[in-house]
Amino acid sequence: MPLEQLTHIFLVMNLGQSDFKNLLNKSDATVISEEHIKTLLFNMLSAVNFMHSANIVHRDLKPANFLVD
């Protein structure tokens, strides 16, 4: 199939060790400072901004879809 006829691109990546939702749910066992939260949120918003600037739309933005290592 010629490249011009392709309409979708799917990215498949390795599964991360944890995600933002699991990190928040385990906050009793894990100490998360305000600075950590600010850094994670800044990185998430920067990633979404980058995707939007490249005309990429993510249809399922939620804490479980942001991987944390």
Image (spheres, rainbow, N blue to C red):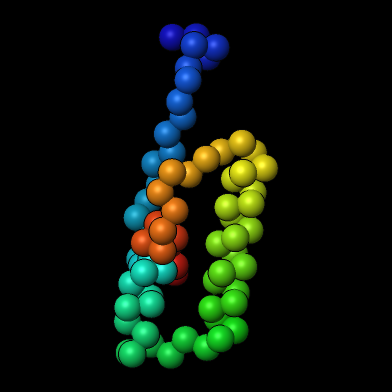
Position of 49 relative to 57 (above/below): below
The x and y percentages for residue 47 are: 59, 55
Position of 41 relative to 62 (above/below): below
Position of 32 relative to 54 (above/below): below
Which one is in front, 12 or 57? Answer: 57
Q: Is residue 6 left or right of residue 19?
A: right
Position of 58 relative to 6 (above/below): below
The x and y percentages for residue 38 are: 59, 77
The quarter of the image holding the N terminus is top left
Displayed quadrant of residue 59: top left
The x and y percentages for residue 40 are: 55, 71
In the image, what residue occupies the spot 58% across and 52% down? 48
Q: How many marks?
A: 0
Which one is in front, 26 or 2? Answer: 26
In the image, what residue occupies the spot 37% across and 51% down? 14
In the image, what residue occupies the spot 55% across and 12% down? 4
In the image, what residue occupies the spot 60% across and 60% down? 45
The quarter of the image holding the C terminus is bottom left
Displayed quadrant of residue 16: bottom left
Which one is in front, 62 or 40? Answer: 62
